Image (tube, helix red, strand yellow):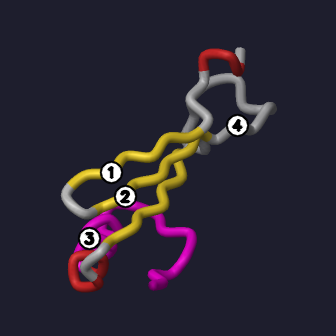
Amino acid sequence: SRKDKIVHVELKFWGVSILASDNMDSTESSKTDSSCVHLSLGFEDPLKMELTYEKLKQDGQPTMPLKE
């Protein structure tokens, strides 16, 4: 049931803002390899942004290039 889902969340700490959202695909009834969480990160420091993106990219699957 969707009532127990977290649709989106924003976390702010150490000068970073993290936005996350659930995959609300109604055809997906359980956690599978296609389940995902989408993140949007906001940084005050451009260098910290680039370094974090590169680290997340190592084991993650970016769907968009890094943009300021």
Q: Position of residue 58 (x, y in %)?
A: 30, 68
- Check the image and report above or below for 4 versus 59: above
Q: Earlier in the sequence, mark 3 or mark 4?
A: 4
- Which label is found at residue 12? 1
Q: Earlier in the sequence, mark 1 or mark 2?
A: 1
Callout 4 crowding tier (Cα within 10 Å): few <14, some 14–19, many ≥20: some
Residue at image position (32%, 65%) is 56
Label 1 vs label 3: CA separation?
Answer: 15 Å
- Check the image and report above or below for 46 versus 4: below
Q: Earlier in the sequence, mark 1 or mark 3?
A: 1
Query: Does the magenta run of residues contain 61?
Result: yes
Q: Nearer the viewer, residue 43 or 38?
A: 43
Classify the position of the N terminus by image quarter: top right
Q: Earlier in the sequence, mark 3 or mark 2?
A: 2
- How many numbered tags mark residues here? 4
Residue located beneath label 3 in the image: 52
Label 4 vs label 1: CA separation?
Answer: 23 Å
Q: Position of residue 34 (x, y in %)?
A: 61, 44
Residue at image position (64%, 41%) is 23
User: Nearer the observer, disc 1 or disc 3?
Assistant: 1
Residue located beneath label 4 in the image: 24
- Secondary structure state at the residue bearing disc 3: helix
Q: Earlier in the sequence, mark 4 or mark 2?
A: 2
Residue at image position (72%, 31%) is 28
Label 3 vs label 4: CA separation?
Answer: 26 Å
Label 4 vs label 2: CA separation?
Answer: 22 Å
- Secondary structure state at the residue bearing disc 1: strand
Q: Which residues are magenta?
A: 51-68
Q: Position of residue 68 (x, y in %)?
A: 45, 84
- Asked whether disc 1 touches disc 2, contact meaning CB atoms under 8 Å apart, the reply is yes
